[in-house]
Image (cartoon, rainbow, N blue to C red):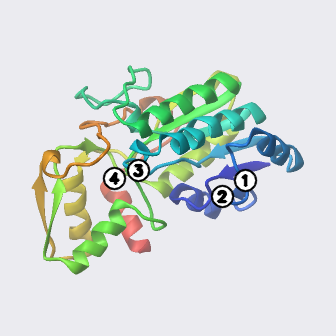
Amino acid sequence: MFLITGASGQLGQELIKILPGAIYTTRYDLDITDLYAVKKFIKSNNIDTIINCAAYTAVDKAEQDQITASKVNINGPRNLAKSCEKIIHISTDYVFDGLVHRPYLTEDKTNPVSVYGSTKLAGEKEVLKNSRQSIIIRTAWLYSQYGNNFVKTMRRLGNEKDNINVVSDQIGSPTYAADLAKAIVQILPQISPENKGIYHFTNEGVCSWYDFAHEIMKISGLKCKVNPIPSSAYPTPAKRPFYSVLDKSKIKEVFNIKIQHWSNALEQCLKQL
């Protein structure tokens, strides 16, 4: 039996559509920071595989709320990994500092520049240490038709304003949650001690937040003008990596996964909205 934690999030809701037989929990159903509660839940529901989508993802808020971020992003994954042999754990591009100007390989040196990135990196290490058949999937710039995300915010602003400013010096790859969910389902039957390790998944292609916003307006047929600005003009409590493109060759080779370009994926998502 599969357990999907963080079911109310973007990825969790996409997984519900394609794994209807699984057990889904939110923080109200299962407190992953409580080891006793986790072990009891997994035993009583005959769980043999966990997909952990639960995370503290408020990047800026985490700078002031390190205790909660650590509980959810470090203790939670540790408890899940200690309680179940097979686990797919979702992580982030924010484990890197963004100073290497080529796509990051899974084995590249990590150096998070925020509390969020640090706690997510520590969570990865706990999962790998405590579970014999663990798969870490780092992703980036996640969006979907569900929840709050950049795509939905841009659509709303595009309908309300004539022009907006968006940072143009942070470079990465957007990820459509539905595509990541499909990849996870493809990986599930291939989880094994031999495949244990860290993998990267985003959609193909590279862009800035400005490029991404521009494409959202264009596909949506919105007349709102997008102006490029430097990150220095939009200061935030947490630092972001300037370049966090992830190299996906390992996940494609090991699990035979095909990945579409971010612009095609965006078009599909916008049709759902």
Mark 4: which amino acid? Trp
Mark 2 vs mark 1, CA separation in Å: 6 Å
Q: Which residue is mark 2?
A: 26
Upstream in the sequence, badge 4 or badge 1? 1
Circle 3 or circle 4, nearest the eye: 3
Q: Residue at x 41, y 45 (%)?
A: 64
Q: Is residue 84 visible?
A: no
Q: Regarding mark 2 in the picture, which secondary structure is present there?
A: loop
Residue 196 picture quarter: top right
Relative to the observer, which residue lies in front, 51 or 61? Answer: 61
Q: Crowding at label 1, few (<14), some or many (≥20) Cα neighbours within 10 Å?
A: some
Q: Residue at x 77, y 35 (%)?
A: 83
Q: Regarding mark 1 in the picture, which secondary structure is present there?
A: loop
Q: Which residue is mark 4?
A: 262
Marks 4 and 1 close (CB-CB < 8 Å): no
Mark 3: which amino acid? Lys
Relative to the observer, which residue lies in front, 111 or 21? Answer: 111
Mark 4 vs mark 1, CA separation in Å: 34 Å
Q: In which quadrant of the rendered image does the C terminus lie?
A: bottom left
Upstream in the sequence, badge 3 or badge 4? 3
Q: Is residue 150 above or below residue 115?
A: below
Q: State the image coordinates of residue 79 (x, y, percent, origin top left).
A: 70, 36
Q: Which residue is mark 3?
A: 61
Q: Regarding mark 3 in the picture, which secondary structure is present there?
A: helix
55 relative to 172 in the view: left or right? right
Mark 2: which amino acid? Thr
Q: Regarding mark 4 in the picture, which secondary structure is present there?
A: helix
Marks 2 and 1 close (CB-CB < 8 Å): yes
Mark 1 vs mark 3, CA separation in Å: 23 Å
What number is the disc on residue 168? none
Relative to the observer, which residue lies in front, 106 or 261? Answer: 106
Mark 1: which amino acid? Leu
